[in-house]
Amino acid sequence: MPVPPRGSSVSSVSKRIPSGRSIFIRPAAKCGRRLTRRELYRFRIDTRDFVETAWTLEKAPRPYIRKFAQMKNGDDFRKLEWQLFCDSKTRARLLFGDELDKDATGTRIVAMTVGSEKPPQFTRFPARVGPYETWTAAIASDAVKNLFAVPRLGMGQSTLLPDGKTTSFFLEIETRGLERAWTQLSGTCPAATVNATLPRWPLPPPPPLPR
């Protein structure tokens, strides 16, 4: 093992890399916070343009299923979120939230594709809550299985700008974890439709995204 360079701490670690050379990795100082997605990208620690979590069950007073993602947006990343609620034994509700720039303009519509099956129909006009726009789609509980019957769902957004031009994007998201989470959530569905107010958006931050 080579001798650590002068000035290195005794906690430095020698690591063998494929070329056969050894490098010393010094533990990062504890800064009390995690690096943001923008910092991970800028420092070239993780240069993916799109990252996502699995669908997971959130054990809140009113349980729901949640998925979180971030996608490259210029020099920064924008947050996307999906939430699935069970309103009754026969009806579920899917919410989609998109974080926008504070100076964003235009009218946006969103749509989802579910393989060859009929997709959920989101409301045409979103609700604006802080930096988020949110859309809602009512789904028959029996149709929820169509969402996890495919490995990926398509999500598209089209924006009509004030000058009459349009912009759009399309991405695919994994359904990983959705079947298991729905099996757990459906067991808690009330017999009658729940009219309670949905949780305030945005909800507390999700677990760290996969590295």
Image (cartoon, grey):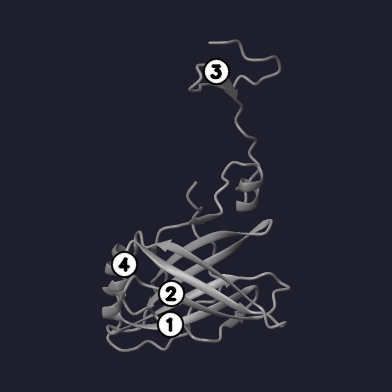
Q: Are marks 1 and 2 in contact (CB under 8 Å)?
A: yes
Q: Earlier in the sequence, mark 3 or mark 2?
A: 3
Q: CA distance from mark 1 to mark 4?
A: 16 Å
Q: Secondary structure at mark 3?
A: strand
Tell me which amino acid carries mark 1: Ala
Q: Earlier in the sequence, mark 1 or mark 4?
A: 1
Q: Which residue is mark 2?
A: 112
Q: CA distance from mark 1 to mark 2?
A: 10 Å
Q: Which residue is mark 1?
A: 137
Q: Secondary structure at mark 2?
A: strand
| Label 2 Cα neighbours within 10 Å, binned few <14 / some 14-19 / many ≥20 | some
| Label 1 Cα neighbours within 10 Å, binned few <14 / some 14-19 / many ≥20 | some
Q: Nearer the viewer, residue 182 or 109?
A: 109
Q: Which residue is mark 3?
A: 22
Q: Quadrant of residue 83?
A: bottom left
Q: CA distance from mark 3 to mark 2?
A: 49 Å
Q: Earlier in the sequence, mark 4 or mark 3?
A: 3
Query: How far across and down, in percent of the image, does residue 22 sit?
Result: 55, 18
